[in-house]
Structure formats: structure tokens, C-alpha cells
Image: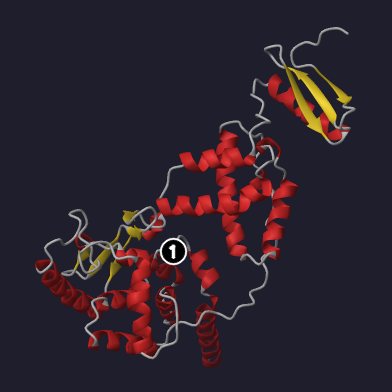
Amino acid sequence: MAKRGKGEGSLYKRKSDGRWVGELTLPDGTQKYLYGRTRAIASARLFEAQQRLKHGQPLPDERLTVAKYLEEWIQKKDGKAATLKRYGDIIRCHFIPAWGRIALARLTVDQVEAFYRQKLAEGLAWGTIRTMRGVLHTALQDALRREKVTRNVADLAKLPKEPEETAPPLEPLTPEEANALLKVAHEQGDRFEALYWLAVTTGMREGELLGLCWPEVDLAHGTIQVRRTLSLVHGAHLDPPKSKTSRRTILLTAQAIEALKVHQDRQKWEQKHCPHWGDGVHDLVFPNTVGRAQSIPDFLCDHFQPLLHDAGLRKVTFHLFRHTAISWLLRQGIPLPDVAAYVGHANTATTLRTYSHPLADSQKRIVDAMERTLAEG
């Protein structure tokens, strides 16, 4: 048999396991073997490899598994600690069990779509699966850029249709409930009273509140600059906010300003009587009793939940304060883009997706206004 030239190949069926093999001669004279369960699959892989060699492109490493690539990728990726932890959890708990042993270059659209359907059947929220898709897209886009794969299957795979919402809409606090909580916090001299005022009136995230520093508070002009958020991943530290739009300046209500002034005076007294106050780095507005970062779980368990009980309120999550503030603003007819900017949503689509119920109330007012206009004619 004549010796094949560079880039030439042949197909044959292996007797030991019945798989088809595409044998290709590489530019350095060595042989590369491409396998397929059928002749068509092996032939397609051989042709793809020949085309890449023809255009001077490297061939993906068939020995690089999904598990190995993703583990190396997450270790090298830059980003906030909390984000990287979330990505790592998705990779270890979901991607690797599903595809870990598969060659990265051979991960298919069908396998990814089957994965999405399986996770939805297991009861995972559709939004969680969409987040997984985003992680996979980012990881494979880096693999594509580094020529470890020839396509990004996450771009080609379709998510299952979003199921209709079956859970009842999240009920925000009523003004009566919010006032009851704030009243009890004041009567008890709660050291986080000002935090509750900010949560109710600004809709700030709990990490933004506990990561707030005094240099970002301007009591004279009644504003707060959201520039950091508290993260407890690998120790307590301050990270940039969730997104670019989360960096914002918030105008405060008169009640929130007054509560902050009282809080500042109390904190000065605490600082004066604590010889080891703070860590010498951050000037936190809502630290623990020794001036260091307040643990979010400890805050929720030791302060927030007991306050709900004392105020006679239903058991809710702290995030409901944010939901409440946004719902109130929308029901007051504040334009959607203004609300989204005020609370730091990445775009109005986020607000629309989550807060359709108060927006329906606004639409009712629009219809009423239209009927009144027509009646006047």
C-alpha cells in the first residue's frame, strides 16, 4: 500500500468492537484516529479534521474530557468569589456527573438538550437551568477561543419551554406590616433599625446593606452610593456589586436619613467603648458589635427573624423587603425604567419578569383613564 500524504485519510471497521475508525496523517507524519459508532459518524469526523488541517487549524484534543476542562477552567477564571463558587457548584454537582467522561470535543447538542430536559423533570426551576446554560456557554466560548472545540454547543442547544408559573405570586408586605416592624424595631432600640428603614424604602439587597460603608453615605444631601456588596465566600470581604447597573446613587427618605443619624451616634458610642473595634480597613455602616463584617446568616437568625416574631408578622425572607419596595413603587405608577434603575436591575426585562402583578394594577389604571377620556368626548 502506497504511503498516504499529509492530510490524507482512510476509513475502516475495527473487528474488536465494531467501531468505525478514521485514520488521518498529520503534518508531522504521525497518525490520528477518529472513532464513530457508524461509518457516517467516523466519516464526518475525518472530513472535519481534514478541513481543519487544510485551513491550518489545530485539531481538538480527543483526550481532553469535559470534567478535566471545566475543572481547569473554573480554577483559572477571574471573577467575584461568590460567582465563582456558584459556577463551581454547578460544574461539580451537575455538569461533571452528566458529561464528565465525555471528550470535550464530542459533547453534542442532543446531550445538552437532554440534560436540560432531565433537570427540569427533576424539579429544578427553569430559571436555574437558564443559569446553567449561561455557565456552560461561557466555559465553551473560552474553549472555542482557545481552539479546544470547533463549536459552542451551548449556543445551538435549546432550552425547554418555560413552564407556566404554578406558584402563587409572592405577596409583598403591606404598609401596615412594614410600619409594625419598624415600630417594634424602634421601641426595642434595635441596632439595625436604620437598616430596616433602608431595606423597606430603597429595596437594597442584603449584601449591599451589610457592605455599605460610611464614606458612601452623604447625610447632608440624603444620598447613598451603592459601590460594594458583602460576600462571605472564603471569609468576609467586599466585592463589586452584582452588575454595572447595581452601582447606583440612591436618594433617601427623610425617615431613613433620621434613622441613619441616630444609628451613627449609637455606633460612635459603641466604637468608643470597644478597644478592638473594626479591622482597620472598612468603615462599615452595619457591622457586628465589634465593628467587623456582620455575618448574613447570623443577622437573619439572631436579629431579623426574632424581630418578625415580636412584630407579629408572617415568616418571610429578608429579600421580601426588596420585593416590597419594588412592588410599592410600581403600584404608585413610577415608570418602569425609573424603578429598574433605582433598585439596580440590569434591565427592565428583569423587573417585568418578576413584578408583573403590580404592573397589572398599573394597566388597570391606564384602562380606566382611557375610558374616562372617551366618556368626556
Q: Position of residue 297 (x, y in %)?
A: 38, 68
Q: Nearer the viewer, residue 366 or 331?
A: 331
Relative side of 121 to 363, left or right: right
Question: Residue 210's quadrant in the figure?
Answer: bottom left
Picture residue at 23% right of the left edge, 66% below the top: 285
Q: Nearer the viewer, residue 25 or 220?
A: 25
What quarter of the picture does the N terminus occupy? top right
Q: Please state which amino acid type lies under the numbered disc 1.
A: His
Question: Is residue 109 placed above or below 361 in the rendered structure?
Answer: above
Residue 200: tell me if it is visible: no
* Tag count: 1
Picture residue at 20% right of the left edge, 56% below the top: 279
Q: Which residue is mark 1?
A: 345
Relative side of 331 to 283, left or right: right
Q: Nearer the viewer, residue 106 or 271?
A: 271
Relative side of 329 to 370, left or right: left
Picture residue at 34% right of the left edge, 83% below the top: 307
| Crowdedness near tag 1: few (<14), some (14–19) or many (≥20) residues, C-alpha within 10 Å | some
- In the image as oriented, which residue stretches furthest toward the top? 2
Q: Position of residue 256 (x, y in %)?
A: 25, 77
Question: Is residue 239 placed above or below 327 in the rendered structure?
Answer: above
Question: Residue 342's quadrant in the figure?
Answer: bottom left
> Secondary structure beneath disc 1?
loop
